[in-house]
Image (cartoon, helix red, strand yellow):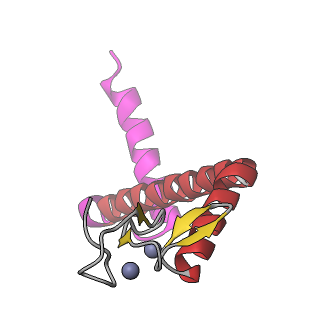
Amino acid sequence: MATCANHPIRMATARCKCCNKPLCNECRHVTDAGIFCSPECESRTRQFTERASGGTVTYRKRFFTKRTVRGLLILLIVLIGAAAFLHFTLGVSSWSDLKAVFAQWWEARYLLLP
Ligand SMILES: [Zn+2]
Ligand SMILES: [Zn+2]
């Protein structure tokens, strides 16, 4: 076992559950949530465990929203990319230009038929 993080001459008897710091008998804070080096570490671990045990549904919801937002962002980038492609390769700059291009394709389809 390592020596105490605060007292290099004392042997550590426990480790902080939050930051894993080695602690001696004097430095450790024993609580019902575990052994910690400071009240800050205790509250941090309590918040974490409360979120992990009680907030499973909200976590999933948040995760889903994150994924949805990412999906929408990718869709937006693809749409902007498609618009940029049409603009720079076919000279389409407005909706009517786009319709004209599609009309041309439509006519070309008939011309290609035997
Ligand atoms: Zn700690
Ligand atoms: Zn100590």
Q: Residue furthest bottom?
A: 6
Instruction: Quadrant for residue 1, please give it.
Output: bottom left
How would you classify the magenta stretch by its main secondary structure?
A: helix
Side of 106 relative to 72 (left or right): left
> In the rendering, at what x and y percent does residue 52 appear?
64, 53
Q: Quadrant of the C terminus?
A: top left
Q: Looking at the image, in which quadrant does ligand 1 appear?
A: bottom left
> In the rendering, at what x and y percent does residue 112 appear?
31, 25
> In the rendering, at what x and y percent does residue 24 appear?
40, 73
Residue at image position (56%, 57%) is 66
Residue at image position (31%, 83%) is 7
Q: Is residue 91 above or below residue 53?
A: below
Residue at image position (48%, 62%) is 17
Side of 25 relative to 29 (left or right): left
Side of 51 relative to 106 (left or right): right
Side of 25 relative to 9 (left or right): right
Q: Is residue 73 magenta?
A: no
Q: Is residue 108 above or below residue 59?
A: above
> In the rendering, at what x and y percent does residue 100 appear?
45, 55
Boundaries of the magenta span: 88-114
Residue at image position (26%, 66%) is 88
Q: Is residue 94 magenta?
A: yes
Total count of labels: 0
